Image (cartoon, rainbow, N blue to C red):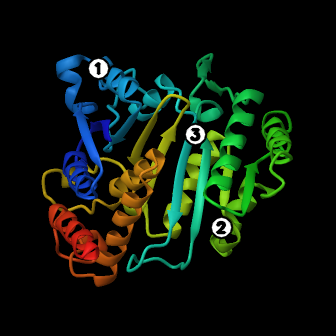
């Protein structure tokens, strides 16, 4: 079977790491027809927007995309290209695993968490306005529909991935109506999954718990803004954004992308490690049901990290982006023989 997949290389270091990921994924044995389309700051002059319609059309047609980091232009009507992409395609579930990898400097060992973040509403949706000259007001919108949908996604994910527990994160002790509704919905959905443990944590306490004993947690589900913050905290537990994959998933499409930014000062230098986008590609293959190919890539990544001789500067080595990709491909080949 051949898959049609949209590839958005992105800005800054995006094209280099996207090309590295594409080569590794192609070497895994999965047949992919890549539909390469450009978005971001680099296309504004040509299209008058960082997110041209043909990019959205490609993702809608193919149903799946792998995306490099995009630069959000300053001083234009776009609050965020990424946020707009999620909104236009109704990608309601943001999924960010945080998993310890060998030889990545971190204070923690054996972390294996997944943050499931509601992606369409809450304060992060940016519904705000000025009240006169001297005050600004942001509106926090939490709906039953979106809350139940993301809670159900978290439990279905936990069941499918054989996870043991789902923790709902909130601030319902203070925001009794909005976060209270989110918590109520999570509890109602949890009742339908007796095989999975359920608990809830207040968001500030959750942050402390994650720093003190992350091994106690498994799947975390939460509203949009808390998810933005806590997913970065969890990335910090496993070595930073450079090894943090992510996915935005909806009913009719999915976009897989690294959590980190476009790092324009390193663009074109073949320096930055491609792990975040490559691990996002592994998530994409799992989403497609290509679990053997996904496992093959993950084993090769682990082997290269354990060996430690083909790592980029940010991982303590001297290899370039493309050389690290070559090493991962070579490991896949050698593991097959």
Quarter of the rendering containing residue 188: top right
What residue is disc 1 on? 54
Up-down relation of residue 216 to residue 58 (above or below): below
What residue is disc 2 on? 210
Image coordinates for residue 211, horizontal then vertical, percent: 63, 70
Mark 1 residue crowding within 10 angstroms, few (<14) / some (14–19) / many (20+): few
Query: Can residue 16 be seen at all in this image of the molecule?
Result: yes
Who comes first in sequence, dot 3 or dot 1?
Answer: 1
Q: Residue at x 80, y 42 (%)?
A: 189
Which element type, helix, strand or loop, lies under badge 2?
Answer: helix
Count of numbered marks: 3
* Mark pair 3, 1: CA separation: 23 Å
Disc 1 + disc 2, Cβ < 8 Å:
no
**Which mark identifies residue 93?**
3
Query: Can residue 9 be seen at all in this image of the molecule?
Result: no
Up-down relation of residue 124 to residue 78 (above or below): below
**Along the line of sight, the residue nearer the viewer: 26 or 54:** 26
Q: The C terminus is located in which quarter?
A: bottom left
**Along the line of sight, the residue nearer the viewer: 124 or 293:** 293
Q: Residue at x 27, y 42 (%)?
A: 32
Up-down relation of residue 249 to residue 336 (above or below): above
Up-down relation of residue 292 to residue 150 (above or below): below
Which element type, helix, strand or loop, lies under badge 3?
Answer: strand
Who comes first in sequence, dot 2 or dot 3?
Answer: 3
* Mark pair 1, 2: CA separation: 41 Å
Q: 155 left or right of 323?
A: right
Mark 2 residue crowding within 10 angstroms, few (<14) / some (14–19) / many (20+): some
């Amino acid at each position: 079977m051949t898959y049609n997949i949209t590839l958005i290389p992105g800005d800054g270091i995006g094209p280099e790491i996207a090309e590295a990921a594409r080569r590794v994924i192609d070497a895994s044995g999965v047949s992919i027809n890549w539909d390469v389309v450009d978005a971001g700051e680099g296309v504004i002059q040509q299209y008058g927007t960082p997110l041209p319609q043909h990019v959205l059309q490609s993702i809608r047609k193919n149903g799946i995309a792998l995306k490099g980091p995009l630069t959000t232009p300053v001083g234009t009507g776009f609050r965020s290209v990424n946020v707009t992409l999620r909104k236009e395609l109704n990608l309601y579930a943001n999924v960010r695993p945080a998993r310890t990898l060998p030889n990545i400097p971190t204070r923690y060992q054996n972390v294996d968490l997944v943050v499931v973040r509601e992606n369409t509403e809450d304060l992060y949706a940016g519904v705000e306005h000025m009240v006169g000259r001297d005050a600004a007001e942001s509106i926090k919108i939490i709906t039953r529909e979106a809350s139940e949908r993301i809670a159900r996604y978290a439990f279905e994910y936990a069941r499918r991935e054989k996870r043991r527990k789902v923790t709902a994160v909130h601030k319902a002790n203070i925001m009794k109506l909005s976060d209270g509704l989110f918590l109520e919905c999570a509890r109602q959905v949890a009742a339908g999954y007796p095989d999975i443990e359920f608990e809830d944590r207040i968001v500030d306490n959750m942050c402390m718990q994650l720093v003190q004993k992350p091994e106690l947690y498994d799947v975390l589900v939460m509203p949009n803004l808390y998810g933005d913050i806590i997913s970065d905290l969890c990335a910090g537990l496993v070595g930073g954004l450079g090894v943090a994959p992510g996915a935005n998933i909806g009913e009719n499409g999915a976009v897989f992308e690294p959590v980190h930014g476009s790092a324009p000062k390193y663009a074109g230098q073949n320096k930055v490690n491609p792990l975040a986008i490559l691990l996002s590609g592994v998530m994409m293959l799992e989403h497609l049901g290509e679990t053997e190919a996904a496992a093959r890539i993950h084993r090769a990544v682990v082997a290269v990290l354990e060996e430690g001789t083909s790592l980029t500067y940010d991982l303590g080595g001297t290899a370039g982006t493309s050389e690290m990709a070559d090493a991962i491909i070579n490991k896949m080949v050698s593991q097959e023989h």
